[in-house]
Amino acid sequence: MSNGFVILPPVKPSPPPDRRDAIVYVVDDEAPVRRALATLMRSVDMHVETFSSTEEFLHFARPAVPSCLLLDVRLRNKNGLAFQQEIVQSGLGIPVLFMTGHGDIEMSVKAMKSGAMDFFAKPFRDQDMLDAIGQALARDATRLASENVAAGLRASYGTLSPREKEVLPFVLAGLLNKQIASEMNLSEITVKVHRGQVMRKLNARSLPDLVRKAEALGIEPHESRDSQVLRGGTGDARR
């Protein structure tokens, strides 16, 4: 935890989402391109929503399902690369695939460095586009699953009582029940009950599992008074 990284409980890669339950968003200011792409997506049973501008896309009520954004680089009122930056800064985690009729290597490199999944120069092979979209939807399904795990963990932590939240950091530090009891001026049986409730409410199968979940929540272990003395107390204590 000291390295600044937050470690979430592991999430297995999600299976490819049902195409009817996922959405491909297309933003292109050319109507013929939008129609052609919509026809392509629907030919393989993909749900597609098309927009002529980024503003239309942003005002669309997007459900929390696996999705990806197929974005034209050169739009009339907005540069696609600039819009990608806005998406990243807003925290919208949707995978982005670029397409352009005027692309170059520098532009594609910039897009990929900013997190785009792919960059297509028009005209492109339909199958290449469909393959890239399938990968983007699978990645977004995994992202949503991870976010659901994190949200569920936060909700579980919210069910802990104030005393259980006080006990948790001592448990994370590896203290025994009698040591925690001494630190908190509680009876050992009371600590045992609180400890059990913490494990149950957080659905932790073991102490290492509890530690991983606490790391995801940003909860640090609590040092005991004895360890604090040994680490930073008198010279005699350190020898």
Image: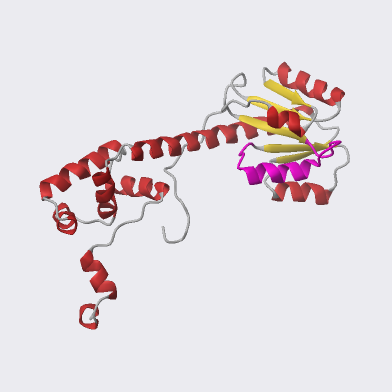
Compared across the picture, whether 5 is left or right of 220 comes to right
Q: How many marks?
A: 0
In the rendered structure, which segment of residues is drawn in magenta?
A: 72-94
Compared with 106, 10 (above or below) is above
Q: Along the line of sight, which residue is nearer the eye, 112 or 54? A: 54
Q: State which quarter of the image contains the C terminus.
A: bottom left
Residue depicted at 78% across the width and 40% down the height: 80
The structure's colour scheme is: secondary structure
Q: Quadrant of residue 179?
A: bottom left
Residue depicted at 81% across the width and 42% down the height: 79
Residue depicted at 70% across the width and 22% down the height: 48
Compared across the picture, whether 81 is left or right of 14 comes to right
Q: State which quarter of the image contains the N terminus.
A: bottom left
- Does residue 133 belong to the magenta stretch? no
Considering every residue shown, the one lying at the far right of the view is 102
The answer to whether residue 218 shows anywhere in this view is yes
The answer to whether residue 131 shows anywhere in this view is no
Compared with 28, 117 (above or below) is below
Q: Where does residue 200 sit, x and y in percent of width and height?
A: 26, 37
Residue depicted at 27% across the width and 44% down the height: 162
Q: Where does residue 177 sit, x and y in percent of width and height?
A: 16, 52
Compared with 80, 5 (above or below) is below
- Does residue 75 belong to the magenta stretch? yes
Q: Where does residue 130 sit, x and y in percent of width and height?
A: 71, 28
Q: Where does residue 187 sit, x and y in percent of width and height?
A: 11, 50
Q: Along the line of sight, which residue is nearer the eye, 197 or 101? A: 197
